[in-house]
Amino acid sequence: MEIKNSTPKLVDHYRTRLESTVQEDKVRTRQTDAPVQQPVGDRISVSPEARLRTETYTAAMAAPDIRREKVNNIKDKIASGTYDVDPKNIAKKLLQSDVELAQAVRR
Protein backbone atom coordinates (compact mmCIF):
# COMPACT_ATOMS: atom_id res chain seq x y z
CA MET A 1 0.00 0.00 0.00
CA GLU A 2 1.26 3.46 -0.80
CA ILE A 3 0.21 6.45 1.27
CA LYS A 4 0.63 9.74 -0.51
CA ASN A 5 0.76 13.15 1.08
CA SER A 6 1.27 11.74 4.54
CA THR A 7 2.14 14.15 7.26
CA PRO A 8 4.70 13.50 9.98
CA LYS A 9 1.87 13.72 12.51
CA LEU A 10 0.00 10.91 10.76
CA VAL A 11 3.11 8.73 10.56
CA ASP A 12 3.88 9.39 14.23
CA HIS A 13 0.32 8.35 15.12
CA TYR A 14 0.78 4.98 13.39
CA ARG A 15 4.24 4.47 14.87
CA THR A 16 2.92 5.24 18.38
CA ARG A 17 0.01 2.86 17.87
CA LEU A 18 2.33 0.08 16.67
CA GLU A 19 4.71 0.57 19.58
CA SER A 20 1.77 0.54 21.98
CA THR A 21 0.51 -2.73 20.50
CA VAL A 22 3.95 -4.32 20.80
CA GLN A 23 4.22 -3.22 24.44
CA GLU A 24 0.76 -4.61 25.21
CA ASP A 25 1.76 -7.93 23.64
CA LYS A 26 4.90 -8.06 25.79
CA VAL A 27 2.88 -7.42 28.94
CA ARG A 28 0.33 -10.10 27.97
CA THR A 29 3.14 -12.56 27.32
CA ARG A 30 4.61 -12.02 30.76
CA GLN A 31 1.19 -12.45 32.33
CA THR A 32 0.10 -15.58 30.46
CA ASP A 33 3.37 -17.07 29.23
CA ALA A 34 1.52 -17.65 25.95
CA PRO A 35 3.39 -17.18 22.70
CA VAL A 36 2.92 -13.77 21.14
CA GLN A 37 1.67 -13.59 17.62
CA GLN A 38 3.42 -10.95 15.61
CA PRO A 39 1.12 -8.36 14.11
CA VAL A 40 0.31 -9.24 10.53
CA GLY A 41 0.73 -6.44 8.02
CA ASP A 42 -1.47 -5.64 5.08
CA ARG A 43 -1.54 -8.25 2.36
CA ILE A 44 -2.52 -8.14 -1.25
CA SER A 45 -3.68 -11.01 -3.41
CA VAL A 46 -3.53 -10.74 -7.20
CA SER A 47 -5.72 -12.97 -9.31
CA PRO A 48 -4.32 -14.85 -12.31
CA GLU A 49 -6.49 -12.67 -14.58
CA ALA A 50 -4.98 -9.51 -13.10
CA ARG A 51 -1.47 -10.91 -13.58
CA LEU A 52 -2.29 -11.71 -17.21
CA ARG A 53 -3.63 -8.20 -17.76
CA THR A 54 -0.50 -6.72 -16.23
CA GLU A 55 1.77 -8.89 -18.38
CA THR A 56 -0.25 -8.01 -21.49
CA TYR A 57 -0.15 -4.31 -20.70
CA THR A 58 3.61 -4.45 -20.05
CA ALA A 59 4.21 -6.26 -23.35
CA ALA A 60 2.03 -3.77 -25.23
CA MET A 61 3.86 -0.82 -23.71
CA ALA A 62 7.23 -2.37 -24.64
CA ALA A 63 6.21 -2.92 -28.26
CA PRO A 64 7.08 -0.18 -30.74
CA ASP A 65 4.18 2.12 -31.59
CA ILE A 66 4.72 1.90 -35.35
CA ARG A 67 6.18 -0.96 -37.37
CA ARG A 68 7.94 1.22 -39.94
CA GLU A 69 8.75 -1.59 -42.38
CA LYS A 70 5.07 -2.55 -42.69
CA VAL A 71 3.92 1.05 -42.97
CA ASN A 72 6.49 1.84 -45.64
CA ASN A 73 5.61 -1.33 -47.57
CA ILE A 74 1.91 -0.41 -47.59
CA LYS A 75 2.68 3.20 -48.56
CA ASP A 76 4.73 1.98 -51.50
CA LYS A 77 1.91 -0.34 -52.64
CA ILE A 78 -0.68 2.45 -52.35
CA ALA A 79 1.55 4.83 -54.28
CA SER A 80 2.08 2.29 -57.05
CA GLY A 81 -1.60 1.28 -57.15
CA THR A 82 -0.91 -2.35 -56.24
CA TYR A 83 -2.39 -2.33 -52.72
CA ASP A 84 -5.24 -4.82 -52.69
CA VAL A 85 -7.65 -5.19 -49.78
CA ASP A 86 -9.60 -8.46 -49.48
CA PRO A 87 -12.61 -7.76 -47.22
CA LYS A 88 -13.42 -11.48 -46.85
CA ASN A 89 -9.90 -12.20 -45.64
CA ILE A 90 -10.12 -9.33 -43.13
CA ALA A 91 -13.48 -10.60 -41.83
CA LYS A 92 -12.11 -14.15 -41.58
CA LYS A 93 -9.11 -12.99 -39.53
CA LEU A 94 -11.31 -10.87 -37.23
CA LEU A 95 -13.55 -13.84 -36.52
CA GLN A 96 -10.54 -16.10 -35.98
CA SER A 97 -9.15 -13.58 -33.53
CA ASP A 98 -12.45 -13.56 -31.60
CA VAL A 99 -12.48 -17.37 -31.42
CA GLU A 100 -8.90 -17.45 -30.13
CA LEU A 101 -9.71 -14.80 -27.54
CA ALA A 102 -12.75 -16.75 -26.34
CA GLN A 103 -10.64 -19.90 -26.01
CA ALA A 104 -7.98 -18.04 -24.03
CA VAL A 105 -10.61 -16.67 -21.64
CA ARG A 106 -11.96 -20.20 -20.95
CA ARG A 107 -8.54 -21.46 -19.91
Image (spheres, grey):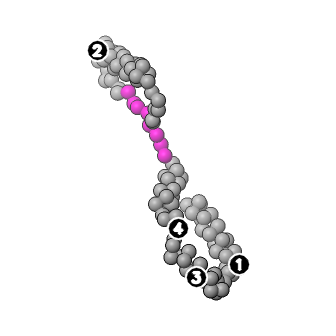
Q: Determine whether, in the image, residue 62 is placed left or right of residue 107.
A: left
Which residue, given by chain and number where applicable, does mark 3 sit on? 76
Q: Which of the two residues, 8 or 103, is positioned nearer the viewer here?
A: 8
Name the residue rendered at 53%, 54% in the picture.
53
Helix or strand or loop: what does disc 4 sit on?
loop
Look at label 4 and name its amino acid.
Ile
In the image, which residues are magenta? 39-46
Q: Is residue 69 above or below residue 9?
A: below
Mark 4 nearby-residue class (10 Å; few <14, some 14–19, many ≥20): few
The answer to whether any part of residue 34 appears in the image is: yes
Which residue, given by chain and number where applicable, does mark 1 sit on? 87
Sequence-earlier tag: 4 or 3: 4
Helix or strand or loop: what does disc 3 sit on?
helix
Majority secondary structure of magenta residues: loop
Q: Are marks 2 and 1 in contact (CB under 8 Å)?
A: no
Mark 1 nearby-residue class (10 Å; few <14, some 14–19, many ≥20): few
| Mark 2 vs mark 1, CA separation in Å | 80 Å
Look at label 3 and name its amino acid.
Asp
Q: How many marks?
A: 4
Q: Which of the two residues, 82 or 105, is positioned nearer the viewer here?
A: 82
